[in-house]
């Protein structure tokens, strides 16, 4: 059975996704600017930031990764490295 694979974004936890969006907010200062760059509504960004049951889907995470890579690659690498460490610890416990 063939399934869709969304690449790196598929392996980023909700916590990691939230770190990415907060980092973008630090870089761009407004939810409106993030929404504009992702071609979504400000309400969607607001929901991600303020509702525990909402977070960016893989498509939006992939777009955010590209934006952050171009804006502040060092911060992006730090977030991804933290995600890798969390995943590694979970594997070692298993």
Image: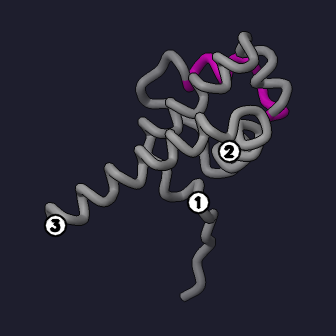
User: Is 19 above or below relative to 64?
Assistant: above
Find the distance from the CA under tag 1 to the CA under tag 2.
9 Å
Q: Which residue is mark 3?
A: 94
Per the rendering, the mark at residue 47 is none
Per the rendering, the mark at residue 8 is 1
Q: Position of residue 24 (x, y in %)?
A: 67, 25
Find the distance from the CA under tag 2 to the CA under tag 3.
29 Å
Tell me if mark 3 has few (under 14), some (14-19) or many (20+) residues whose alpha carbon lies within 10 angstroms of its own: few
Instruction: Give the mark nearest the N terminus, 2 or 3.
Output: 2
Q: Residue at x 66, y 18 (%)?
A: 25
Query: What residue range appears in magenta?
Result: 38-48
Per the rendering, the mark at residue 65 is 2
Tell me, yes or no, whether the two marked residues, 1 and 2, touch with CB atoms within 8 Å. yes
Q: Residue at x 33, y 56 (%)?
A: 87
Instruction: Give the mark nearest the N terminus, 1 or 3.
Output: 1
Tell me if mark 1 has few (under 14), some (14-19) or many (20+) residues whose alpha carbon lies within 10 angstroms of its own: few
Q: Residue at x 71, y 37 (%)?
A: 68
Towards the viewer: 27 or 54: 27
User: Is 32 above or below relative to 76?
Assistant: above
Tell me if mark 2 has few (under 14), some (14-19) or many (20+) residues whose alpha carbon lies within 10 angstroms of its own: many
Image quarter for residue 38? top right
User: Is 53 above or below relative to 5?
Assistant: above
Q: Left or right: where does residue 61 sit relative to residue 15?
A: right
């Amino acid at each position: 059975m063939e399934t869709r694979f969304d690449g790196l974004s598929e392996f980023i936890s909700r916590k990691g996704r939230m770190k990415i969006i907060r980092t973008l907010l630090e870089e761009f200062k407004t939810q409106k600017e993030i929404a504009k760059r992702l071609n979504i509504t400000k309400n969607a960004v607001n929901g991600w930031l303020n509702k525990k049951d909402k977070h960016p889907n893989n498509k939006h995470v992939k777009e955010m990764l590209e934006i952050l890579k171009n804006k502040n690659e060092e911060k992006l690498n730090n977030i991804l490295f933290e995600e890798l460490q969390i995943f590694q610890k979970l594997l070692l416990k298993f």
